[in-house]
Image (cartoon, grey):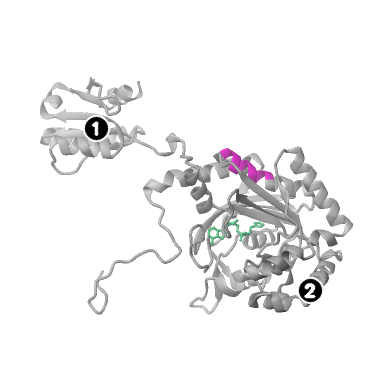
Amino acid sequence: MTSESGERRRFQTVRGTNDTLPDDQPYWDWVRSAAQSVAHRFGFRRIDTPVFEETALFVRTVGEGTDIVEKEMYTFTDRGDDMLTLRPEGTAPVCRAYIQHGMHTLPQPVRAFYITPIFRYERPQSGRLRQHHQFGVEAIGDPNPEIDAEVIHVLWSLFEELGLKNLRLHVNSIGCSNGDCRPRYLNSLRKYYSTRLDKSCEDCHTRYEKNTLRLLDCKEGQCQPIIDDAPTPTDSLCQDCADHFERLRSLLDLWEIPYTVTPRLVRGLDYYTRTVFEVHPAIEGSQTALGAGGRYDGLVEQLGGAPTPGVGFGSGIERIIMNLREAGLTPPDDLSPRTDLYIVYLGDTAHQHALRLAAELRKNGLSVSLPTGSRSLRAQLRSASAANARYALIIGDDEVAKGAAALRDLDTSEQSDVSLDAEAVKAAIAS
Ligand code: HAM
């Protein structure tokens, strides 16, 4: 590429974004198809929303004081002066769609899943990207803890299906804001911190003022002893929230999903109420959650809909694939499709015949490759094995005259003669 100044430069992916090359695709196909199949098993159907939305949709729901809204959104003004944001999370758009399309008239809860790119201007590191992809599910319109448990079951089943082991599920309840449990808790947390602010980090001073619950999420070393002794949301739950949490735990027990109650678990988005959860690998770092979510009973109302409960999760596909690779787990063979036949030809008549045969076999559903131009037999056979072809058909002008040619099994090197018409070749390959 030559720039205006005449300088040549090679472009690279933007920091924090990745190409998914053909060799990577079997992993992606594997995770996507497992996610889709698990979601269907639990009655979730696919939803797709646009990549960008009005900025206010996210500011209002994810929350003004959150890292996502304050530091991480890809926001721009378009040519019509509308303020838009590339989707930084999947839940608010699904709730927007639920309201916009009157989905409250459907049987509740509406169960939807998505597989979609997410954009956050974060500091890139292993497992933390500026464009990542999430598999997420949302169940909207049901307040019962059975749905919370089912949503967690979907995520757990996906990891089981993929063979990921030694994962830890952390659950907690952060209470509700319509009863008095959340306000009561925030008061006690503020009171606790008021005498410890001098020992807290700079960011926690801001959290104390703007987003008190997030004090528990601070990663700074100096704040850890303070967090360790802080009051927990579960200490302040109202009776309804306590019952809800207990029922959720009893269902996880019933379905034999192992979990740890982590009483200081809070989440980085403001819309959560009651249930919150995260799944981590056994060896944890700060950016390791493989999936996370919770209940968001006020979100639809915040967006102008009727009061409607909801619960869901999002799970990072890049992180899942990273863990699969680390565990030495590989996609099933049928997700790395092979070329059925590579046609090798020598001479002009054979070339013509090869072109005709390839077209006919492709029409019959076979995957067929053949070289372009004229190349040596050895070069062509090398290309056949580079294409991971199962068979090679070797045609010279003599073979065309005879109407038969050698079909070589490239796995066993066995060779047999086959008549040079599409039906016969197809039958020989299938046998
Ligand atoms: P979240 O915890 O922000 O929640 O993200 C969900 C998951 O996406 C994380 O557990 C992680 O696996 C993956 N993830 C997040 N950020 C990155 C990143 N920068 N790079 C790679 N992977 C990442 C939400 O987004 C909520 N909308 C989840 C939800 C759905 N809650 C209810 N419904």
* Mark 2 or mark 1: whose residue is earlier in sequence: 2
Chief SS of the magenta region:
helix
Residue 194 sits above or below residue 266 on the image = below
Percent position of residue 242, x then y = 84, 54
Q: Can residue 107 be seen in this view?
A: no
- Segment colored magenta: 153-161
Q: Do the residues labelled 2 and 1 touch (CB within 8 Å)?
A: no
Considering the image in quadrants, where does the C terminus appear?
top left
- Image point 18% across, 33% down: which residue? 353
* Residue 5 within the magenta-colored segment of the rendering: no
Residue 289 sits above or below residue 187 on the image = above
The circle on residue 357 is: 1
Q: Is mark 2 within 8 Å of ligand 1?
A: no
Closest to the observer, 252 or 6: 252
Q: Is mark 1 within 8 Å of ligand 1?
A: no
- Image point 68% across, 62% down: which residue? 267
Name the amino acid type tagged 2: Arg
Closest to the observer, 388 or 400: 388
Q: How crowded is mark 2: few (under 14 residues within 10 Å), some or many (20 or more)?
A: some
The circle on residue 190 is: 2
Percent position of residue 178, x then y = 84, 65
Considering the image in quadrants, where does the N terminus appear?
bottom left
Name the amino acid type tagged 1: Leu
Q: In which quarter of the image is residue 253?
A: top right
Query: What secondary structure is marked by label 2?
Result: helix
Q: In this view, does 352 lie to the left or right of 167?
A: left
Q: How far apart are marks 2 and 1 (CA)?
A: 77 Å
